[in-house]
Image: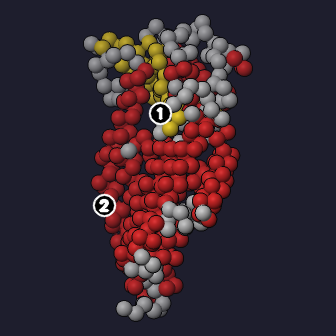
Amino acid sequence: MSQWKNFSKGFVKENPVFVLLLGLCPTLGVTSTAINGMAMGLATLFVLLMSNIVVSLIKDYIPDKVRIPSFIVVIASFVTIVDLVMAGYAPAVHEQLGLFIPLIVVNCIVLGRAEAFASKNTFVKSLVDGLGMGLGFTFALTLLGSVREIIGNLSIFGFKFMEGDGILVFILPPGAFIALGYLIAVMNKFKKA
Amino acid sequence: MAKKESTFLNMVITLFIVTLVASTALAYVYELTKEPIEMAKLAKKLAAIEAVIPEYDNNPVDDMYKVAIGEGGDSLEFYPAAMNGETVGTAIRCFSNKGYGGLVWLMVGISTDGTIYDISVVDHKETPGLGTKMAEPKFKAQFKGIDPESVDIRVTKDGGDIDAITAATISSRAFSEATILAIDTYKKGVIK
């Protein structure tokens, strides 16, 4: 597999949200606005990238039977780092995302990539994979957040383009499921074409 | 390089090293971000206080005192504002547990004549797009400058004079309740 294919698979062919349907908890929870979706995506991107790099570097020194605990410790460390840094330097965003930042640690996409990819591939490949998957995740969350914000609040990235209130249900949790369902349908069509 | 065998000793040593490195790294980052986090919290508090009281030249955070609510052990934090040594208002950090998503924390500013100067929302977990509208000027304007003696600070559904936010009556009610708590405590603590 070429490096480019390895990188781009995270966007369409194996998009973590739209195709693999992994990590749906934050996907549905925080995407009420485009900004929130993007911030969450970027935080996950960082964790995914760093954990993929570290796991691919240490994989040969970890006995098989304790690999999952070791990976989790690595991932949890990076999540805590993101949490602390965000609280210190971006308090407004941190407040918005709240509980979902520490919850990145149980996001199956992160452990999934560590176990299924980084623990079997080289450093460079894992780095590219983490970057591709992370950006794919960010892209999906931003898209979902944008759709919900446009329909629910008639604004995009906090910028109001039309007066009025929009369809409220799209801001609420049920709207996340509805919007995600339609986006998956569109992505499936796009994928086959 | 061959994979390490899963012997007991190997596993213990590996896990020990992994956790040791991880905790060292975290301790380092914690130290590094401790100050910015404190600063961010303080800045947020100051911004909330500043928004709800008239111009002042003292340090309300240093002059903070506590006034007990009723008979119970709980108390509210009062931040007095003074200009040239004369009190111009008080910011009260108050709360309500009737929110849609748990506690709602407000900062209520009260002028010396007992009217509400302004209110800011400090912390809450209300529904985005609905309950969060309580932080917007449209809703808050109803409280600005009113005298709690003459205006009933409850939502209209409870027989008061405040129009609740559409589809967020519970959040509006929590907002009102916290404000009432601040005013009642203020009457007890400041006007004796």
Cβ–Cβ under 8 Å for marks 2 and 1: no
Q: Return the x and y of residue A174 as percentages of the image width and height.
A: 68, 46
Circle on res. A25: none
Specify the amino acid type for callout 2: Tyr
Circle on res. B28: 2
Q: Which residue is more in the foreground, A112 or A182? A: A182
| Quarter location, residue A131 | bottom left
Residue B24, visible in the rendered structure: yes
Q: Nearer the viewer, mark 2 or mark 1?
A: 1
Q: Return the x and y of residue B77 as percentages of the image width and height.
A: 45, 29
Q: Residue at x 39, y 66 (%)?
A: A50
Q: Left or right: A33 with respect to B174?
A: left
Q: Which residue is mark 1?
A: A159
**Secondary structure under badge 1?**
strand
Query: Mark 2 Cα within 10 Å, few/some/many (few <14, many 20+)?
Result: few
Number of labels in the image equals: 2
Query: Mark 1 Cα within 10 Å, few/some/many (few <14, many 20+)?
Result: few
Q: Left or right: B33 with respect to A158?
A: left
When the figure is inspected, residue A157 is found, relative to residue A124, above or below; the finding is above
| Quarter location, residue B64 | top left
Q: Residue at x 38, y 39 (%)?
A: B41
When the figure is inspected, residue B15 is found, relative to residue B175, above or below; the finding is below
The reply to whether label 2 and label 1 mark residues of one chain is no
Specify the amino acid type for callout 1: Phe
Chain letter of the residue beneath label 1 in the structure image: A
